Amino acid sequence: SATDLVAFAISSMSALPALASFCGYAAICIFFLWLFASTFFTGCMVLDERRQRDHRRECLCFLTRKNKAENDDGGYQEGFLSRYFRKYHAPLILSSIGKIVVLAGFAGLFGFGVYGAINLPVEDTQRAFIPSDSYVTEWLGTFDENFPSAGGIDVAFVFEDNDEIYKSRNELASLHTRLAGKSTSSPWIAEPVPAATYRNVLAGYKENVGNFSDVELGDDGWPTSSDDFVSSLRYFLFDSGYGSAYVTDVAFGGTNDNTTTIDAIQILSEYVGLTKQKSDGSIIDDADRQIDAMDDTRTMVEESWTDLPEQRFVYSEKFIAVEGFKVIKKELFLNVGLALCAVAVIVLLTVASPMTALLITVAVAMCLVEILGFMFLLGIAIDSVSVINLVLAVGLSVDYSAHVGHCFMVKGGSSKNERATEALADIGAAVLSGATSTFLAVVVLLFSSSYVFSVLSKQFALTVGLGVLHGLVLLPVLLSIFGPKPFASAADDTSSEGKNKALENDNDDDEEVQEEEEPTKHVGGSSDSSSSSNDDSAAADDAMKNVEIDNDDAGSDGSCSC
């Protein structure tokens, strides 16, 4: 609980709103789960133990059993899974050849994970949230097939300050010359074709201002004063009938009846279709090109257009999503890395062994990298859904390794292989059962048509599968090689066979004692028993005398016979 709580608490400070909200909610839930588990659930367990001791029924507690339960006197019996880990699993992976195979196999798996993590793309998955059998999905597919170059992204160049706009009127009206030739490389701005991909209110105004008889124009074809420019521009937009298409491109200051200034104008353009085709033939937005287009457009406006109004910026509604694309990969590695560091600290405090905590952290880190590799193989892109699931994977995968590592530390003995074997026999069944129940909880979602549930189930299946492999296969091998000594308080439980033999000997001794005492219990033959007992005593005395004589002879000769 502590590892999950800290991991989610750290990720709740993410710059991604969706990730921060989810992780904050999850951290609060985990805290209350721990609180109820350590208080309410513990009390229920105590009450259930009292019920068992009173031989009461499970559901009908007011009824008692007439006879004790069958397993009341049996004690603990090692189950099938524990015997499997002790007799087959542990000897297989802890043998010399087994260790080589395990280390080589996981090294290759980790290399594949690194390759996948490097090449894992950031994609716009908005379309994926639409059900595959939806009419909208069919329409989008038909549109992409027949009009692949259509559907560009609108972009607006905004300029502010009335006086600056008037001073730069010629440059602003001819802005299309600066945007031409940028469609084949970043910033991927479409060729400025009027009425199609480009709309400039000042260019339209200049084409029609000569038709206004009450406006005095200069040699450059523009009004001679700023006030005439503002009043004629307003007339062009609202009264002339020529500028109705540009009404939304100018923001005037003051009231509608007394307009004297221009607060801002926008010149609209468009990006080319920044899409790409996936391996399955579907068309999706190319997040990498969109990020380049946004960054390069901003750089062009802020650093290259220094002769235009000082207060200028570029904006597109798509930038909201592109800003997320830009930071989500960094946020992924940052949040997962911070969560992993927090888990390492918590494991160190709970396991109390730096080497064991390091090996557990290495196993968890390798598991996470390999999850990224399989995400690349399955075509799962980096988005808000997959990032949330990866943060969840940190808390889930550490459980499978931490329990094995802690159990290894409480096993006494000098043989690391035997300690690893005992740890697997004790805790391996519980770890495997927990992983199986977690997998069964999400396995039905693997066949869901919902994008969220499909990605969730796939990543959970990867987390459970890889987490169990690292906890029950890789970590025991690492502990058998690099594992530290056990806790000082750990009992030497590696000689289980010796203990069993000792118990067998004790039982044999008890049986012999009972056999020796049985003749004294025959009432009918008491005299025979008494005489035989006397004969046995006499024989024992003679034997002792002979032993003493032999010892005296051996001592006089100066030799010792053993």
Image (cartoon, helix red, strand yellow):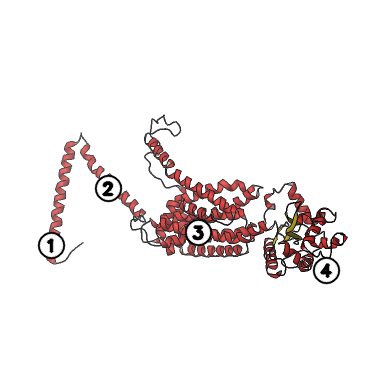
Q: Quadrant of the C terminus?
A: bottom left
Q: Which residue is mark 4?
A: 220
Label 1 crowd (10 A; few <14 / some 14-19 / many >=20): few
Label 4 crowd (10 A; few <14 / some 14-19 / many >=20): few
Q: Residue at x 31, y 51 (%)?
A: 502
Q: Earlier in the sequence, mark 3 or mark 1?
A: 3
Q: Can the viewer see residue 425 in this picture?
A: yes
Q: Which residue is mark 2?
A: 509
Q: Mark 2 falls on what kind of element?
A: helix
Q: Residue at x 41, y 62 (%)?
A: 354
Q: Which residue is mark 3?
A: 340
Name the one closer to the observer, 513 or 100. Answer: 100
Name the one closer to the observer, 338 or 395. Answer: 338
Q: Earlier in the sequence, mark 1 or mark 4?
A: 4
Q: Earlier in the sequence, mark 4 or mark 2?
A: 4
Q: Looking at numbered disc 4 in the image, what kind of residue is underneath it?
A: Asp
Label 2 crowd (10 A; few <14 / some 14-19 / many >=20): few
- Tell me the CA gap for discs 2 and 3: 56 Å
Q: Looking at numbered disc 1 in the image, what kind of residue is underneath it?
A: Asp
**Quadrant location of residue 327?**
bottom right
Q: Mark 1 falls on what kind of element?
A: helix
Q: Looking at numbered disc 3 in the image, what kind of residue is underneath it?
A: Leu
Q: Which residue is mark 1?
A: 553
- Tell me the CA gap for discs 1 and 4: 142 Å
Left or right side of 241 for 72: left
